[in-house]
Image (tube, rainbow, N blue to C red):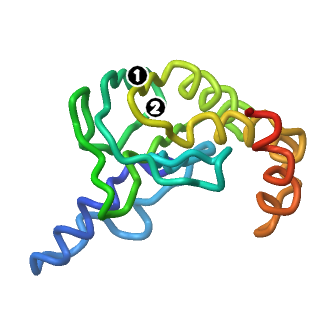
Amino acid sequence: MITGFDLVQEQIRIAGGGGLSVSQQDVKISGHAIECRINAEDAARDFLPSPGRITRWEPPQGPGIRLDSHMSAGAIIPPFYDSMVGKLIVHGSDRADAIARLADAIDNFVVEGVPTTLPLHRAIIAHPDFIENRIHTRWLEQVLLPDYGKKAA
């Protein structure tokens, strides 16, 4: 999202025996991107997996929004595999713009039929620590999660 190059496409090209389609000099970084991995899990219930059927699927759309997913209304989330249903990626001119765009994208992302981690992502990006970039690798379990289930109940 910040370079304009599809890294997955480049990986597939290389795996097929081809070379990179760009050189390092071609890569220019612009703006800020944030990714949320949307899982069929209930974060308020200790990330309980949520197998079942998606009854409504309306992903967000618009400039600077990308969703990598194979889901749709009627899709079944099996209990046997990874619970990820999609990767929501947004791009903004800077961190504040990316956070605002992500908040809007999450608010406009409708998934019904199974609980997902969308409410958790809403809580994360609304937290002052996230907004001010004062997070660390243990932040979620030390700061946000201790009260999260209580607030969501």
Residue wearing tag 2: 65
CA distance separating discs 2 and 1: 6 Å
Q: Which numbered dot is residue 61?
A: 1
Q: Is residue 59 left or right of residue 99?
A: left
Q: Secondary structure at mark 2?
A: strand
Seen at 30% across and 24% down, the residue is: 55
Q: Against 54, is 46 above or below? A: below
For label 1, the crowd category at 10 Å Cα-Cα, with few meaning under 14, some 14 to 19 and many 20 or more, is: few
Dot 2, crowdedness within 10 Å: few (<14), some or many (≥20)?
some
The amino acid at mark 2 is Ile
Residue drawn at (81%, 46%) of the image: 130
Residue name at image x 79 percent, y 43 percent: 148
Q: Are marks 2 and 1 in contact (CB under 8 Å)?
A: yes
- The location of residue 40, given as percent across then percent down, is 44, 46
Q: Quadrant of residue 104?
A: top right
Q: Secondary structure at mark 1?
A: loop
- Give the numbered dot on residue 27: none
Tag 1: amino acid: Gln
